[in-house]
């Protein structure tokens, strides 16, 4: 897998929603933003086992965190796909990056494109 950089703005910690999360949820959300599968679209396939193995968070805690994130319209987890709902809002895309986002979107399974 290619080594890719991801930038997280320092204002992340001052976001009023992030401030409401417990420590496990903060780590989990940060993991979703920065793990090796994350792409410019913010939609990728990943299993609960991999999330647990890489983050050290139990599957039960992950499930509870995902339920919380979904209630707050931040992340959708469906059929082993993560959808970070506000991911693109926080990206500054140059024209090549925009083409990459469009390509990633077109490659998604049809059931995800409507979400």
Image: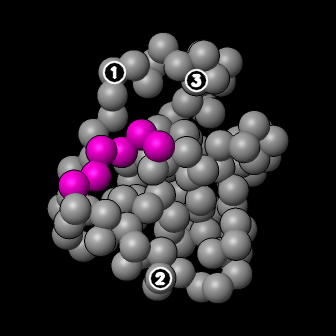
- Visual colour scheme: one colour
Picture layout, residue 33 above or below residue 108: above
Q: Nearer the viewer, mark 2 or mark 3?
A: 2
Q: Which residues are magenta?
A: 89-94
The vertical placement of 5 against 43, above or below, is above
Residue under numbered circle 2: 106
The image quarter containing residue 41 is bottom left
Does the magenta portion include 24? Answer: no
Q: For label 3, count other residues whose C-alpha is less than 10 Å away and answer few (under 14), some (14-19) or many (20+).
A: some
> Label 3, on which residue?
18
The label nearer to you, 1 versus 2, is 2
Q: Earlier in the sequence, mark 2 or mark 3?
A: 3
Element type at marker 2? helix
Image-based side of 13 in relation to 5, left or right: right
Q: Position of residue 4 (x, y in %)?
A: 21, 58
Q: Nearer the viewer, residue 37 or 113?
A: 113
Residue at 60%, 32% in the rendered image: 24
Q: Quadrant of the C terminus?
A: bottom right
Whether residue 61 is visible to the viewer of this picture, yes or no, is no
**Residue highlighted by disc 1:** 10
Q: Position of residue 51 (x, y in %)?
A: 54, 57
The residue tagged with tag 3: helix, strand or loop? helix
**Would you place residue 34 above or below residue 104 in this image?**
above
How crowded is the residue under tag 2: few (<14 C-alpha within 10 Å), some, or many (20+)? few
Q: CA distance from mark 2 to mark 3?
A: 31 Å
Residue 1 position within the rendered picture, expressed as x and y whole percent measured from the top left = 24, 73
Q: Is residue 93 magenta?
A: yes
Residue 39's disc number: none
């Amino acid at each position: 897998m290619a080594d890719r950089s991801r930038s997280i703005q320092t204002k992340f910690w001052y976001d009023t929603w992030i401030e409401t999360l417990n420590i496990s949820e903060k780590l989990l959300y940060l993991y979703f933003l920065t793990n090796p599968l994350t792409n410019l679209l913010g939609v990728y396939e990943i299993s609960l086992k991999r999330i647990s193995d890489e983050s050290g968070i139990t599957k039960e805690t992950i499930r509870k965190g995902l339920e919380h994130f979904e209630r707050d319209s931040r992340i959708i987890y469906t059929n082993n796909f993560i959808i970070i709902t506000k991911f693109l809002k926080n990206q500054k895309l140059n024209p090549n990056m925009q083409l990459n986002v469009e390509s990633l979107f077109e490659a998604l399974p049809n059931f995800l494109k409507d979400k």
